Image (spheres, helix red, strand yellow):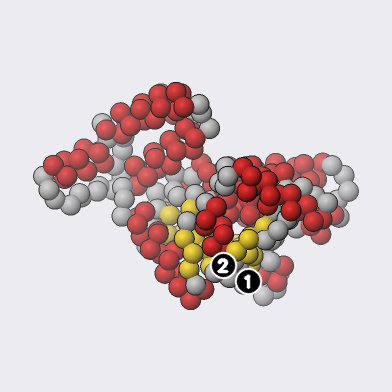
Amino acid sequence: MNDTSPELIETSRDGVTTLTLNRPGRLNPLSESMIAALQDALDRIAADPSVRVVVLTGAGRAFCAGHDLKEMHAHRDREFPEALFERCSRMMLSMVGLPQPVVARVNGLATAAGCQLLATCDLAVASTEARIAVNGIDHGLFCSTPSVPLSRNVPRKQAFEMLFTGEFIDAETARARGLVNRVARPETLDTAVAELCDAIRAKPAATVATGKRMFYRQVERGLTEALRYAGGVMACDMMGDDAQEGVGAFLEKRPPRWAAGSTAPVPAEDADG
C-alpha cells in the first residue's frame, strides 16, 4: 500500500457505512490530512438518512497509532499542534454529534490519540489481537486530549494508571474496564461487529438518533438537571411516530412496523441541534 492510495476508504452496505483508515504501513496515524478526510466523511454521513450505523476501523495490523509524531515534530512552533488538536477535537465531537451510532472495530494497535478515537466511538468491538495504550508519556508528551474521553469511559484510577504509566492493556482488560463492549477472535471480528450493527439497525432510526443526542447531553449534567432534561425528551418521544407504533404493537401483541422517516417532537432546548 503506497501513499497514493485513498487515505480513508468509505464503503456502505445495508445501512452500515464503514470508514477505514488506510495508511497501514504507518499504523494509520491521525495526520492533518487523515483528520480532514474523517471530518469530510462525518459531515456527509450526518446528512445521509440512509446510513444507520457507522463502523470505524483501520487497515492492516493497527486501528490507529495516534497523531503523526513525525509531522508534529517537523513543526516547532506552537501554532501547528494547537490548530491540529483543535481540528482533531472538532472531528471527534462530530462523531459524538452524529445521529448514527459509531462502532469502533478495533482490529489491532490503538495508542495515544488512537485510543482517544476508540474511546470517542459510541461502541467498540475489539479483536483479541488488539493492544491499547495512552503512551504519549513515554515520549515526553502527556496524552492530555486522549485523557478526556478515556476518563469518561473507564474508572478514574484506571484511567490515571494508563495515562501515567503508558502501559498497554489487552482487549479483555479493556472490556473489563468498560473501554470496549465485546471481544472477538480475529476470524470472527467482522461477525461480532455485524451482530452489533444489526441489533441497532433493527431499531427505529429516529428513536436511535434522539436517544444518542439525549445520552450525551444528560451525562455531563448534574443529577437533577439530567433527570429534568431526560424527562422532557422522553415526553416528546412519547408523542412521536415510533413510540406510538411501538407501544401500540406491544399492547396488540404484534411485532412493530417501523416507518421510514418517522419523527418525534423536539424539546425546545434541542431545537438548535
Q: Residue at x 13, y 42 (%)?
A: 251
Answer with left or right where residue 204 lies relative to residue 84: left
Q: Position of residue 127 (x, y in %)?
A: 53, 68
Neighbours of disc 2 within 10 Å: few (<14), some (14-19), many (20+): many
Q: Position of residue 16 (x, y in %)?
A: 42, 59
If you read the primary sequence from the N terminus, does the residue marked by circle 2 or circle 1 appear first?
1
Answer with left or right where residue 244 lies relative to residue 3: left
Examine the rendering and report whether any part of residue 30 can be seen: no
Q: Residue at x 48, y 68 (%)?
A: 184
Q: Quadrant of the N terminus?
A: bottom right
- For the residue pair 38 and 143, the one nearer the viewer reads as 143
Residue farthest to the front?
Answer: 157
Instruction: Give how far apart the Cα atoms at labels 2 and 1 are.
Output: 7 Å
- For the residue pair 273 and 129, the one nearer the viewer reads as 129
Residue 63, by quadrant, is bottom right
Q: Position of residue 34 (x, y in %)?
A: 66, 57
Dot 1 amino acid type: Arg
Can you say whether 253 is above or below 227 in the image? below
Q: Secondary structure at mark 1?
A: loop
Dot 2 amino acid type: Asn
Identify residue for label 2: 107
Residue 118, by quadrant, is bottom right
Identify residue for label 1: 61
Answer with left or right where residue 96 lies relative to residue 132: left
Q: Residue at x 41, y 27 (%)?
A: 227
Can you say whether 212 is above or below 53 in the image? above
Q: Are marks 2 and 1 in contact (CB under 8 Å)?
A: yes
Neighbours of disc 1 within 10 Å: few (<14), some (14-19), many (20+): some
Q: Secondary structure at mark 2?
A: loop
